[in-house]
């Protein structure tokens, strides 16, 4: 199988890698973190100018119009963002929020929202996680009740990625059925400043931003239910598809973070001297560096696999592949993060040095859309990859 990028993809990779190298040094990142929103609006506008915010969308909605939804191109961008430890809400706005509108919205909703995402003027967040849900996307206690000309949304959502800066929030809410029923879940576009919406913002351990969002009888119009030309209570398959897209994107971001951490560590081993010689000359440290490289290459293979499988029309086979890739990425991320910090010694634990920040980001990724145990259990229930002939 050919894993080489085509000319257009190579150009994209070169331009994004150069942008991150020039504009996202460790010192610059610390400056961006001090912004009130926790990221650089200037960089966000730069992404829009380069067309990065419209990669998954059709040209008629201001996007690029890739036939496969830009899966490879998104991987390229996310890997570069992982290397730079970027803070901007690309995953929340483009992959999750934009993905839900792109794949599940009506034509009118796509026309109203996607061009604004692509030009950088609109930010989205996806509010799906609840206190009791424990990674189960079908466990939704937030309710949506019919009103005279719309819906009333009531509930509370935890850990809404970049919910602090979102202009609109896509909320999963139960229209009918039991709390964990797969049927009866709808998706609703909620204005972040609508009456009844309250947000408690906070900084996560890896320097990102998130919010806890409470909805108290928030009124939304009928045409703010995603895909309201069909059954608004059949949203779970769409949520699962977009969650798989996000996990593939996170795998690429993790690969970028691991690759950069590995490179930084190799340079440290070459230059740090003890007893008059570079510590990289000590065989025991060489062996540990090789172990890191092996784990990194395992992660790279599975990140590519996730990208290949993310558009598989069979949700079962797609789910197997994404869960398998996620398990390997989480294991590699934990192992590599621990090793590179230890190889740096005491300086690896300081906030003033970047290697610890890579470890923090990799650690935070371990629980995004399901932790390692969750995805390992899901893969086991599905029979593993062997049944699929992989």
Image (cartoon, grey):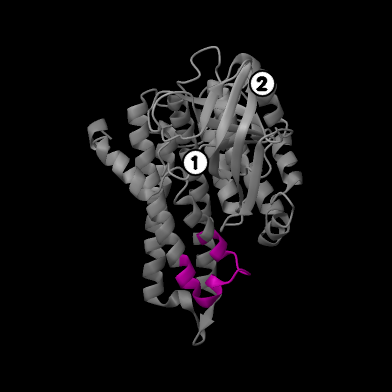
Residue 129's disc number? 1
Where is residue 259 drawn, in percent x and y? 50, 55
Note whether residue 264 is visible.
Answer: yes
Location of the C terminus by quadrant is top left
Residue that numbered label 2 is attached to:
61
Q: Is residue 377 left or right of residue 178?
A: left
Point out residue 61 in the picture as x, y percentages from the top left corner.
Answer: 66, 21
Mark 2 residue crowding within 10 angstroms, few (<14) / some (14–19) / many (20+)? many
Residue drawn at x 59%, y 16% is 106
Residue at the image point whose x is 33% and y is 35% from the top: 320
Give the extent of the magenta segment.
340-359
The secondary element bearing badge 2 is classed as helix
Across and down, in percent, residue 57 comes to 60, 25
Looking at this view, is 135 or 305 the one in front? 135
Q: Nearer the viewer, residue 224 or 67?
A: 224
Examine the rendering and report whether any part of residue 87 can be seen. no
**Magenta stretch: residue 351 in it?**
yes
């Amino acid at each position: 199988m050919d894993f080489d990028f085509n000319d257009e993809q190579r150009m994209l990779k070169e331009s994004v890698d150069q942008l991150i190298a020039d504009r996202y040094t460790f010192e610059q990142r610390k400056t961006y973190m001090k912004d009130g929103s926790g990221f650089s609006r200037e960089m966000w506008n730069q992404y829009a100018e380069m067309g990065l915010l419209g990669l998954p969308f059709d040209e008629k909605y201001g996007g690029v119009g890739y036939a496969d939804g830009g899966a490879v191109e998104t991987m390229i961008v996310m890997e570069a963002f992982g290397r730079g430890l970027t803070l901007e809400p690309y995953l929340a706005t483009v992959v999750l929020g934009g993905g839900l509108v792109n794949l599940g919205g009506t034509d009118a909703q796509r026309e109203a929202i996607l061009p604004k995402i692509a030009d950088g003027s609109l930010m989205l967040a996806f509010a799906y996680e609840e206190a009791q849900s424990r990674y189960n996307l079908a466990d939704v206690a937030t309710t949506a009740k019919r009103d005279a000309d719309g819906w009333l949304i009531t509930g509370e959502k935890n850990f809404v990625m970049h919910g602090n800066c979102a202009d609109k929030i896509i909320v999963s809410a139960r229209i009918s059925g039991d709390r964990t029923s797969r049927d009866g879940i709808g998706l609703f576009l909620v204005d972040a400043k609508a009456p009844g919406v309250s947000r408690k913002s906070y900084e996560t351990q890896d320097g990102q931003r998130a919010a806890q969002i409470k909805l108290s009888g928030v009124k939304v119009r009928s045409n703010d239910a995603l895909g309201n030309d069909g059954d608004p209570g059949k949203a779970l398959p769409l949520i699962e598809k977009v969650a798989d897209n996000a996990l593939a994107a996170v795998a690429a971001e993790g690969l970028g973070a691991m690759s950069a951490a590995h490179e930084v560590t190799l340079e440290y081993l070459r230059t740090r001297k003890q007893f008059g010689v570079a510590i990289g000359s000590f065989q025991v440290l060489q062996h540990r560096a090789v172990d890191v490289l092996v784990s990194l290459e395992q992660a790279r293979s599975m990140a590519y696999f996730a990208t290949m499988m993310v558009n598989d029309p069979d949700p079962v086979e797609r789910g197997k592949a994404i869960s398998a890739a996620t398990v390997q990425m989480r294991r590699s991320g934990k192992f590599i993060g621990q090793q590179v910090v230890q190889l740096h010694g005491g300086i690896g634990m300081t906030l003033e040095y970047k290697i610890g920040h890579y470890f923090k980001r990799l650690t935070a990724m371990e629980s995004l859309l399901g932790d390692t145990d969750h995805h390992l259990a899901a893969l086991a229930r599905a029979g593993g990859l062997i049944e699929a002939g992989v």
